[in-house]
Amino acid sequence: MINLSICFIFFYTLLSISISLFILGLKFLVNDYSLFIEWELLSLNSNSIVMTFLFDWVSLLFMSFVLWISSMVILYSEEYMHGDLYINRFISLVLMFVLSMMFLIISPNLISILLGWDGLGLVSYCLVIYYQNVKSYSAGMITALSNRIGDVALLMSIAWMLNYGSWNYIFYLECSKGNWEMEIIGWMVILAAMTKSAQIPFSSWLPAAMAAPTPVSALVHSSTLVTAGVYLLIRFNILLAETKLGQFMLLIGGLTMFMSGLGANFEYDLKKIIALSTLSQLGLMMSILAMGLPILAFFHLLTHALFKALLFMCAGSIIHNMKNSQDIRSMGSLMKCMPLTTSCLNIANLALCGMPFLAGFYSKDLILEMVSLSYLNIFSFLLYFVSTGLTVCYSFRLIYYSLTGNFNVSSLHPMSDESWVMLKGMLGLLFLAIMGGSMLGWLIMPSPSMICLPFLLKFLTLLVCLLGAWLGYELSKFSLSWELKSMNMFVYTNFMGGMWFMPQLSTIGLNSYFLSLGFKLIKNLDQGWSEYFGGQSIYNFIQKNSMNNQLVQNNDLKIYFFSMIMWVLFLMIMFLV
């Protein structure tokens, strides 16, 4: 009898459920069919606790993709986490994470959404601090606290939904559009989505969450935690189109996209570059959603999940072979040592750039063409196209540093493509990273969109991509930090490469005033005046009096004579009077 490990058991389980859900999703999509289930958990007198589920093609396809990626990540973890004594605990946490995401996907009810939403926040904290060192604890804390802001916003929207008599928001969105009550709920939901999807000013937790093991990063950054906010707004999309909420989200999404693309070009940590790339794509999804194109945002959400999970898995395999070194400057010519892994990395990178006929091309090209066709101001238009150029720029910079260039690895390097279990997990996503975009394009949008643009505007996307690739290659050829230091530009590189000082602003910038105020209070009150007039003062008074009392009780002859004379004088005065 073959003893299967926990990783293989759950790999087969999740894979079979994923395929079943995909087939069911196709059936629902073709028939334009939705299923709304109300399950009464408990009925007490006239009160009933009801659990509601919404099954439509959006939720079924998304669940299928989440479970497919989760199954590949769990298979990948079999070898990546091989030396871990607590592998069962790790897989249990990953499964709880996936279960929380399932709850969130199928809930048309704000209460049950909160179950999945909070589940994602709490389990992500456990996964980020998995390696249990100071850096992990700090990263876990900033992740948990940033997400708590969104949880509070969601709780406030739940309280405000009492105005409608039910928490099934899906019933009220269409009829209540334009009401100020629903607008308040919209603002709260947008705040919750901004924290979960790490939009400005809550972006600093996303690169910090890289302290988690790489399989977790592959799951978090592709289809679970960070996409929860985008998915929630896809459900609430009616509130965004042609409103102030939409205009606000368009600006925030565009700025996030631009900031993270710029930051990734100054970063040398392999995982952080890919994390900033995720942030850039989330900004793209948010901004296209704000323009009133939810199906297009969902299309990009699914295609992005495929190549981003593959990108993280390839990065994890490289880090594993590099003996846990993540600095891209210590890599180079990896294609000679790890041809299969680097091929997967290249395909995922090109899909991210929007290389024609790979997964990312079908969604990104369509998004940028719709942007060109839409009635947008020049600032938003520039943010879209410059950010796309920056995406290609940091992708080619990453390719130059890690796959080509000089061989910077030590001579006794153990690098090879022999990790077959990890490669199987990667190859399971490689096929979808190549074919997934066209397949989803045919399914989700069966009738082709008619986009009529001038020749130059049509080829602007390709031109921006080529320009970004050339710039990325040129920037990689010289020591950027040294050149800019010599030009007195170090402050600007720190600003652009440090996410516009957002990590400092959201940590020491927020708590330094309160910490210094607390220090002054404890020194002046607790350990200052209250001690002087309170505990210490009473102690000194009692101590002084007890010392005087002790002197009296020391059987000193002088004191006896003095007290006897005092008594005699006292008696004489009494008799004379």
Image (cartoon, rainbow, N blue to C red):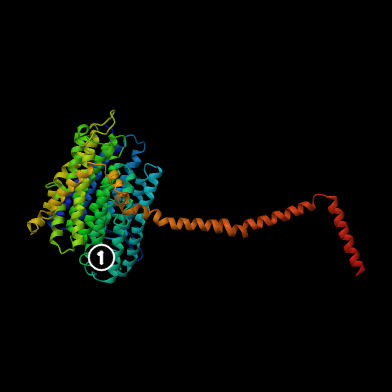
User: Which of the image's four quarters has the N terminus?
Assistant: top left
Q: Name which residue type carries label 1.
A: Leu
Q: Quadrant of residue 33?
A: bottom left
- Seen from this angle, which residue lies furthest front? 487
Give the camera-side residue of 406 and 410: 406
Give the camera-side residue of 103 and 276: 276
Q: Residue 556: x percent and y percent?
A: 83, 50
Q: Is residue 313 above or below residue 539?
A: above
Residue at point 37%, 45% (across, down):
129
Q: Quadrant of residue 192?
A: bottom left
Q: Residue 133: x percent and y percent?
A: 40, 42
Q: Residue 536: x percent and y percent?
A: 63, 56
Residue under label 1, please give it.
245
User: Which of the image's four quarters has the C terminus?
Assistant: bottom right
Give the camera-side residue of 229 and 20: 229
Give the camera-side residue of 468 and 147: 468
Q: How many marks?
A: 1
Instruction: Describe the element under mark 1 as helix, strand or loop.
Output: helix
Q: Is residue 561 left or right of residue 413?
A: right
